[in-house]
Image: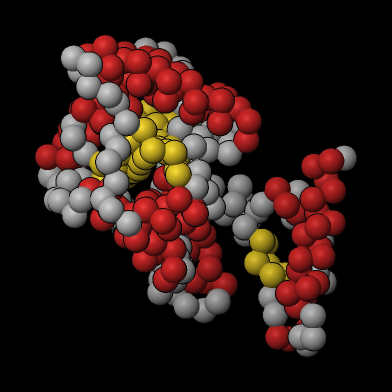
Amino acid sequence: MERLRCWLDLVHVVRDATRGLQPDEFLVVDPDSRLTQLGLLPVVPDSNYLFFPSREYMPSSLESLARLASDWSGQGFGAGDSIQVPTVTITREDTNLARAVVSAFSHEQLRPVLLVNFGVGDNDKKQIGEDFELAVLDFLVGTGAIVILDRGAGAGENSRTDSLAARLTSKRASESAGRAFAILEADEAKLRAASHGAPVEADLLIFNGRVGLLAGLIAASDLYVGYDSAGQHIAAAVGTPSIDIFAGYSSARMLDRWRPTGPGKSIIIDAGSGRSTAEITKEVKAAASHALKNH
């Protein structure tokens, strides 16, 4: 029942957004979302509603959901192939702040910027494990690139990030002949202060903030690395190359459907059952090395 109650909140949001409009002045397009329980719970009259039947549309195609949605939208709105999705519009304020943060963190040097996100949206099947995450993060930091780690959302992801940061600090300290490994924890307020102050001295920036600002940071980065989550789709949409680690998917069709689509090149790492953590780690490192070499 708790999951169904979110529909009531959605109804209120739609009513607020359409208040004062005539029936022929608005249209709700439902992308087969859980908010309407896959179209079962109405939010507006049928005459103001279009539902994208993602499970039935072109069922024999191996195209991603983004490509199918683009095709369906083009036909539905009479635009042919002119509709391109996905697209992310980032506010100018978030874009400017993200660029200023990257500049302050890099001391305006020509170092690649990497954004890492190990969030899994409460689906632990997508996670390889903390040892894998430590190995990848340690490798990326060791390249000399600017590494930004998104803290994630919820108590579980916050706890994992704290553990990962502590283990990385310990590992780096033991291997660097006493040199302190510096981590900067920053929310939006700290980022704003840092963007106007002296160059930031840190080996790793852990970001804790809004998805809009996260999108700005992804757009300002040279490479995105993470599990199957919203971040990979943002990266593809804003044109940032990405390394996407897919685990926990139920079928090969799901891997085809949910792969990121957009101007940003995506390297898919299949982390399905039967593959060892060592194999997956090696493949991620090789993909990152190749991406940085071509930076």
Please identify the quarter of the rendering in which residue 169 is found: top left
Relative height, residue 174 to residue 133 (above, below): above
The reply to whether residue 225 is in sight is: no
For the residue pair 284 and 74, the one nearer the viewer reads as: 284
The reply to whether residue 95 is in sight is: yes
Residue at x 32% of width, y 57% of height: 197
| Residue farthest front in this picture | 198
Residue 27 image offset from top left, x and y in percent: 69, 75
Residue 111 image offset from top left, x and y in percent: 17, 46
Relative height, residue 134 to residue 37 (above, below): above
Residue at x 39% of width, y 61% of height: 97
Q: How many marks?
A: 0
Residue at x 26% of width, y 30% of height: 141
For the residue pair 249 and 63, the one nearer the viewer reads as: 249
| Residue farthest right in this picture | 1
For the residue pair 42 and 108, the one nearer the viewer reads as: 108
Identify the image quadrant of the N terminus.
top right
Residue 34 image offset from top left, x and y in percent: 70, 48
Q: How is the image coloured?
A: secondary structure
Residue 127 image offset from top left, x and y in percent: 49, 25
For the residue pair 108 and 76, the one nearer the viewer reads as: 108
| 105 on left or right of 157 | left
